[in-house]
Image (cartoon, rainbow, N blue to C red):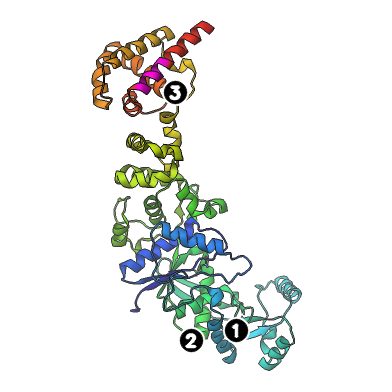
Amino acid sequence: MNRPVRVRIAPSPTGYLHLGTVRTALFNYLFAKQHDGQFVVRIEDTDRGRSLPIYEQDILEGLKDINLAWDEGPDIGGPHGPYRQSERGEIYERYTKKLLDEKKAYWCFCSKEDLDAERKAMLAQGLFPKYSGRCRSLPREDAEKKRAAGEKAVLRLYVSDGRTVSFSDLIRGEVSVKSGSIGDFVIAKSEKELLYNLAVVIDDYEMEISHVIRGEDHISNTPRQILIHEALGIEPPVYAHLPLILSPDKSKLSKRALETSFREYLSQGYLPQALVNFLVLLGWHPDDEQEIFSLDEMIQEFSLKRVSKSGAVFSLDKLEWFNAHYIKHLPFKELLEVLWDFIPPVWKEQKERVEKILAIERTRLKTLSEFEKLASFFFVPEEYDTELLVWQKMNLEEVKEKLTAVLGLLANVSVFDIETLEAALMPYAQEQGRGEVLWPLRVALSGRKKSPSPFEIMSVLGKEETIKRITRACEKIDAYETAT
Ligand code: GLU
């Protein structure tokens, strides 16, 4: 097919943006970029009861946060609008009328009770349960009269039995389904209120969508959509169904994980670059072992041919790994800028200190939200057990002796940078034992078992605070010894 490439995502605003939709958006975006095509966002809000504006806003904002810019959409408009199904009633009406006029669809008045009874009877006879076609023979005029009198009806598509509905999926290959297992299915509640399958077909056609790239959870809808294309006498798009996202034990990913709002990941301090890089590998495998891809590289390398049929495993560890990588490699200024939203307001008054700490801590960060916890002791000294100062078999007396010696050595140091501090203290630490000197010093400065090196910490704290904290450790030892 040599149509210009136009792809779309069609999220339903019945919940917050989640990872699955972002992956679909990303694959569509990459495909569009590769083919000089266009990427469209359409909001599928046919389910009026469950669709909410806040969800639509969350979906659009989330996609903006990761820079997947679209060419047409509800917020920016475009030549094929409106881009919300709830606003497309007039367009839909043309199509439902055409289907009725051409006897491709008919009004059905069967009640839920009728349908249930029919279903039971079919099952009892060992038949595949589907609509019997009872209302097929009702003349159109009679049906319209009944509707005008207020009787409830739905629109069903005629589906003839004994056919095979096939399509060629770019990822899954040939897919065929027997029409007998489908039956006359419901496509609309009224001329303007369509159900998903009909609305999606009309919208994709009207919006000149060339390729429908979407999650495999929709593959069972595709034969129905092909039948609608046939009934309307229009050409279907090319389909590509992306593999399901599975949990690490290969079971279906929990609803919770799938429904975790995508923007929640952003507010936990996952970088957009890391999320995009992580998502592109959920189903797509590059030619080689490369794992780190910039968006430009993805556009170069991505190919639907290398998207696998089997489920893509979601691993939070892997996401953390990507995030740590991007935190480590982002230009420092950029990292500082994104970190800004993750620190307490009072720290912002000490920008230089935050910068120094970030330079030291960035290699330990898996998410930006961890920074506050990792860095808090630099701003406010923390309480710790006096015994934590003790390295292996030392006693507190010896610990105090080492710390006092360190205080003596520091008295002569005026420039508190890492190099100068190392030059001043390392000879003593080598002589007395590194653990014996550096462990108590680190605990005195940080109050923690795990922290950056004492030299790094001192370079941030400066002389006055360093001396204060070491002195405080010595006082704690005195107090401990008096108490015991
Ligand atoms: N509205 C559907 C969804 O949110 C997408 C349908 C489609 O891509 O055809 O899953």
For label 1, the residue is: 158
Q: Are marks 2 and 1 in contact (CB under 8 Å)?
A: no
Residue located at (53% from left, 58% from top): 16
Q: Residues under labels 3 and 2: Cα distance?
A: 74 Å
226 displayed left or right of 280: right
Label 3 CB-ligand 1 distance < 8 A: no
276 displayed left or right of 264: left
Residue 126: name its quadrant: bottom right
Q: Is residue 183 above or below residue 50?
A: below
State which region is magenta. Answer: 464-471
Residue located at (74% from left, 77% from top): 111
N-term-proximal mark, 3 vs 2: 2
Q: Does the magenta segment cover residue 60?
A: no
For label 2, the residue is: 233
Q: Of the residues tagged 3 and 2, which is closer to the observer?
A: 3
Q: Amino acid at mark 2?
A: Gly
Q: Are marks 3 and 2 in contact (CB under 8 Å)?
A: no
For label 3, the residue is: 447
Residue 428 in the image, given as x and y percentages of width and height = 27, 13
Residue 106: name its quadrant: bottom right
For label 2, count other residues whose C-alpha is less than 10 Å away and answer few (under 14), some (14-19) or many (20+): few
N-term-proximal mark, 2 vs 1: 1
